Image: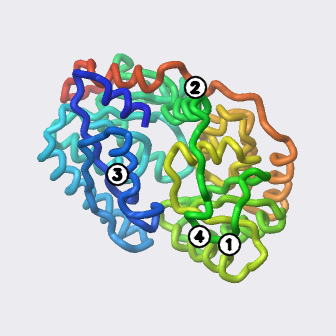
């Protein structure tokens, strides 16, 4: 968000924002159009939408979705005629946009390249790296990996994580208040009292074993219920296996009447960071436990293999999704309290520096492997 703000400020940049993929689906957002409305409230006038999600929770539908994304982004880029396409992360929407841009001879700037993780997302991230002309890794190890992949060091700028800079911005501006009674389902939550945040997504490489995916979700639900603490649980993402987790959430919410969990689909970034900052612990397998939580010093219980290989700070305890080990890690982290804030993903002026380089970099369409 702050990178967009910095680009918008520049007189030498004409900014267009394209929203696509799950961001436009009501089942993954609080309500239709909320992201577009929030952008417009912040003064972003050129906001466009592309629709390409295929319904279904199978590898085939996900592959088709990524392919349709290439078509729809190609149509949009043909209309907008951008000088550069800026993408972030490792999601299928990002790969679709980068592929379309590359085939249309449009330079690609990629934020968060070079990270490793335990899923298909890592392969997607590295594929985007090879399509991209300009790189903004968030940490020294990621920068080193980009160089080892043959990327030109002169096109690699390690300015820290925009997500962490957003955390710093939220802390300076005291965040944003959230009325959880107006969104989500499940138990009412009093955020003036202690609570934990849960963000648990399917693991693509394990998606063929649907029984295991469902069992892991049940185990996590049961252990959080057994703790008796308030919990704010975010809906899983669009990856294969999401429907298995969603089914377990619905069953739990319908059949366990005395639980203290509220299930949410989406919160705007500022509201989410306010909740994260006030939590006792983050549980699950989200990158928010690796990046944003490192700066906050928030205790994290990282469950399973989804973040394998990620560079992490001391606030993270890794555990398999088994009852005994999960319970031990949860109790330990909640009892521990805050860790010292980590500067692992933090640098000064992240968004401003990224915007400056994007606006001034001398792009060349043809890339060359740097030996």
Asked if residue 76 lies left or right of residue 285, the reply is left
- Residue drawn at the location 17% of the way across and 45% of the way down: 77
Within 10 Å of disc 2 (Cα), the crowding (few <14, some 14-19, many 20+) is many
> Is disc 2 placed on a helix, strand or loop?
loop
Q: Position of residue 168 (x, y in %)?
A: 58, 30
Q: Earlier in the sequence, mark 3 or mark 1?
A: 3
Residue underneath mark 3: 36
Which image quadrant: the C terminus?
A: top left
Q: Nearer the viewer, residue 59 or 8?
A: 8
- Residue drawn at the location 40% of the way across and 40% of the way down: 88
Q: Position of residue 104 (x, y in %)?
A: 15, 42
- Residue drawn at the location 61% of the way across and 64% of the way down: 181
Vertical placement of 257 versus 319: above or below?
below
**Mark on residue 245?**
4
Vertical placement of 280 versus 114: above or below?
below
Within 10 Å of disc 3 (Cα), the crowding (few <14, some 14-19, many 20+) is some
Residue underneath mark 2: 346
Does residue 88 show up? yes
Q: Closer to the camera: disc 2 or disc 4?
A: 2
Q: Earlier in the sequence, mark 2 or mark 3?
A: 3
> Is disc 1 placed on a helix, strand or loop?
helix
Q: Closer to the camera: disc 3 or disc 1?
A: 3
Residue underneath mark 1: 215
Asked if residue 80 lies left or right of residue 186, the reply is left
């Amino acid at each position: 968000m702050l990178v967009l703000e910095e680009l918008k400020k520049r007189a030498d940049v004409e900014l267009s924002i394209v929203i696509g993929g799950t961001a436009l689906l009501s089942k993954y957002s609080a309500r239709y159009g909320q992201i577009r409305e929030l952008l417009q409230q912040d003064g972003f006038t050129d906001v466009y939408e592309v629709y390409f999600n295929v319904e279904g929770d199978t590898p085939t539908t996900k592959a088709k979705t990524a392919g349709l994304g290439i078509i729809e982004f190609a149509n949009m880029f043909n209309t907008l005629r951008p000088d550069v396409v800026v993408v972030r992360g490792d999601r299928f929407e990002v790969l679709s946009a980068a592929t379309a841009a590359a085939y249309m001879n449009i330079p690609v700037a990629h934020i968060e390249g070079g990270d490793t993780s335990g899923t298909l997302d890592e392969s997607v991230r590295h594929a985007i790296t090879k399509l991209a002309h300009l790189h903004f890794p968030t940490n020294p190890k990621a920068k080193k990996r980009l160089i080892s992949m043959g990327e030109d060091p002169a096109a690699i700028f390690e300015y820290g994580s925009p997500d962490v800079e957003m955390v710093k911005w939220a802390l300076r501006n005291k965040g944003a208040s959230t009325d959880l009674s107006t969104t989500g389902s499940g138990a009412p939550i009093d955020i003036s009292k202690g609570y934990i945040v849960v963000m648990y997504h399917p693991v693509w490489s394990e998606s063929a074993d649907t029984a295991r995916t469902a069992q892991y979700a049940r185990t996590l639900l049961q252990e959080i219920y057994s703790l008796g603490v308030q919990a704010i649980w975010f809906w899983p993402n669009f990856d294969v296996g999401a429907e298995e987790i969603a089914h377990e959430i619905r069953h739990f919410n319908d059949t366990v009447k005395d639980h203290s969990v509220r299930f949410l689909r989406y919160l705007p970034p500022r509201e989410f960071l306010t909740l994260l900052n006030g939590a006792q612990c983050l549980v699950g397998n989200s990158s928010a436990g690796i990046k944003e939580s490192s700066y906050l010093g928030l205790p994290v219980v990282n469950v399973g293999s989804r973040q394998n290989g990620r560079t992490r700070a001391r606030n993270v305890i890794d555990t398999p999704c088994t009852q005994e080990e999960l319970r031990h890690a949860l109790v330990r982290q909640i009892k521990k309290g805050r860790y010292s804030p980590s500067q692992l993903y933090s640098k000064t002026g992240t968004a401003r520096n990224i915007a400056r380089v994007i606006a001034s970099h001398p792009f060349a369409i043809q890339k060359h492997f740097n030996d």
